[in-house]
Image (tube, helix red, strand yellow):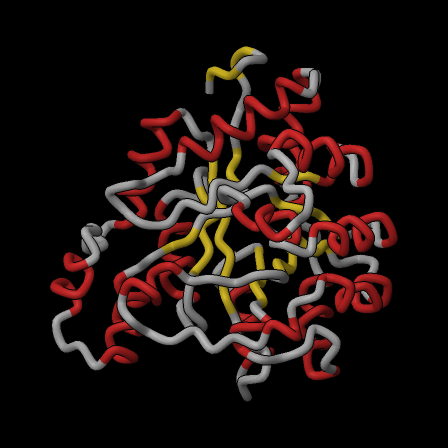
Amino acid sequence: MQTPWGEIAVHDAHAHLFSYSFFEALARQKGADDVPAMVESLGWEVPPANLARRWVTELDKHGVSTSVLMSSVPGDETAAAHVVRAAPDRFHGYFMLNPLAEDAVERARRAFEESGLKGLCLFPAMLRFSVQDPRLTPLYGLAAEQRGRVVFVHMGVLTVGVRAKLGLPSKFDMSLSNPMDLYGVALDHPDVNFVLPHFGAGYFREALMLCDLAPNVYLDTSSSNGWVKYLTPRPTLTQVFEQALEVVGHERLLFGSDSSFFPRGWNRAVFDAQAEALWTLGLSSEQAQAIFGGNLLRLLGR
């Protein structure tokens, strides 16, 4: 992709797979019988049968080399596995898991070993569990078994726009969202690489503290980072990057777009804003390449 540094390869560390089965799950919660009509009421495209091709076309349009695609509802590992099988050179599959489900460990094992997925996604506030719960220990063990696996943990403010648009409640437990809850877990599992999205999503200070103390924790830069409204004084995106670079370094920052639905597709505006901020800070081409893709490929063993 053409950038202020010239041509660099962009590998997106954060995009959501809104599959047909994802919308079916929302329709069941809403009590809707007509899934396509529900999706169209949002002004969005109904996911096509070949969603992988749709995403490949979108990445090609913007010059994006590869992207993480994470299933966006527990139990949807099959959708993530399908797009990875269809285009393994373009996608890195992640899967959302309810770690308290009776079959959680077996589901995770199959996702890693049989489906070739790379990332286990945990949403503590959404599914109401603590990352310190001993029942998660076998899952961390699975992630440590093979190089190239990561544990993605959403901490901080959590909003799900599609749920709000559909009038579905989001009764999340924010008391389970402090990044420092992951401190002991990261130290106990030094062979596991953990990824926190959105710079900690409002817990910026705590996310920086965690990364400073635990070298196996990475920050992804995804979305518009609207959480800055909670900080006083409110930092600019450039200032957020400046502080993150000072504490964490460019080697543990992962660019993410937080793309999800069509027809919006890949969120180019997020990339442009972050590239401008990093260019303003005077990063070298090598540092920019690391943040915009090199670090992700290294993490995933690519």
Q: In this view, does 75 lie to the left or right of 225?
A: left
Task: Name the one closer to the observer, 74 or 174.
Answer: 174
Quadrant for the C terminus in the image: top right
Residue 300, compared with residue 154, is above or below; it is above
Q: In this view, does 289 lie to the left or right of 268?
A: right
Q: Is residue 13 left or right of residue 48?
A: right
Residue 218, image x, y percentages: 71, 48
Residue 92, image x, y percentages: 50, 47
Instruction: Residue 106: tell me if it is visible.
Output: no
Residue sitting at the far front: 233
Which residue: 62% across, 61% down?
156
Residue 78, image x, y percentages: 39, 65
Which residue: 71% across, 69% down?
140
Which residue: 37% across, 27% down?
62
Task: Name the one closer to the observer, 238 or 149.
Answer: 238
Tell me the quarter of the picture where residue 63 sits: top left
Residue 55, image x, y percentages: 32, 42
Q: Is residue 139 left or right of residue 79?
A: right
Task: Name the one closer to the observer, 66 or 13.
Answer: 13
Residue 146, compared with residue 64, is above or below; it is below
For the image, the number of numbered tags is 0
Which residue: 47% across, 26% down?
272
